[in-house]
Amino acid sequence: RKEVEQDPGPFNVPEGATVAFNCTYSNSASQSFFWYRQDCRKEPKLLMSVYSSGNEDGRFTAQLNRASQYISLLIRDSKLSDSATYLCVVNMDTGRRALTFGSGTRLQVQP
Amino acid sequence: SQTIHQWPATLVQPVGSPLSLECTVEGTSNPNLYWYRQAAGRGLQLLFYSVGIGQISSEVPQNLSASRPQDRQFILSSKKLLLSDSGFYLCAWTLGPHNEQFFGPGTRLTVL
């Protein structure tokens, strides 16, 4: 089982749609969680941090369910500019002082 | 504010040639530094991380090495490149308690 697992997609949605991505993680002792956005041939950029039960930033909402070991990202009113790959990232606090990245979910917003 | 630089941006090298990629961070002191590789269509693979000058931890055995000669400089090297070394190399830094990482623009390496 992968340490951080995501549906690779692609998710093809029309502009204005609401889309949700889920991610599961294997280590129940994981401490913090993030969503990164990666555009084609670019570096990943931090989109949101998820520290407790969840948080909201404009059209983006991240939720954490520790009991089921998954996190989700909800995007409302999708824009063409939201097209990208969304990486689920977990700090498993294993002493490596490094994050564990999912392989990403690709989103394509269509006009 | 903090910024992170990587160079070169792109590189095409023959098999068996040496490699040196450089990463520098500005605007912070004593960051944790990381080297990742992303193969085409794949996730990020952690290669090395460093918590201070001269302190390097290797995550996977391979023909790459890393060095941290200065607090804000991280170098990735190889004596002889393999075809499988092709990929997108990303340097990242972190300082916060929750380990949010921030990436440089990356180096796209093609080994022919």
Image: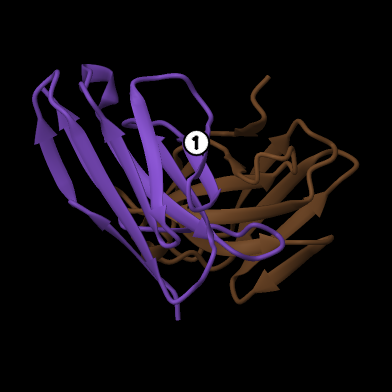
Residue A18 in the image, given as x and y percentages of width and height = 58, 59
Q: Colour of chain A?
A: brown
Q: Quadrant of residue A6?
A: top right
**Does A56 sit left or right of A107 as displayed?**
right
Instruction: Identify the residue at image location x=45%, y=54%.
Output: B92
Residue B58 in the image, given as x and y percentages of width and height = 51, 31
Instruction: Identify the residue at image location x=64%, y=58%.
Output: A74
Q: Amino acid at mark 1?
A: Leu
**Residue placed under numbered mark 1 in the picture:** B46
Closest to the observer: B16 or B56?
Answer: B56
Residue A58 in the image, given as x and y percentages of width and height = 60, 77
Instruction: Identify the residue at image location x=42%, y=43%.
Output: B35
Instruction: Identify the residue at image location x=50%, y=34%.
Output: A8
Which chain is displayed in purple in the rendered image?
A: B
Count of numbered circles on the image = 1
Residue B95 in the image, given as x and y percentages of width and height = 60, 64
Quarter of the rendering occupied by the N terminus of chain A: top right
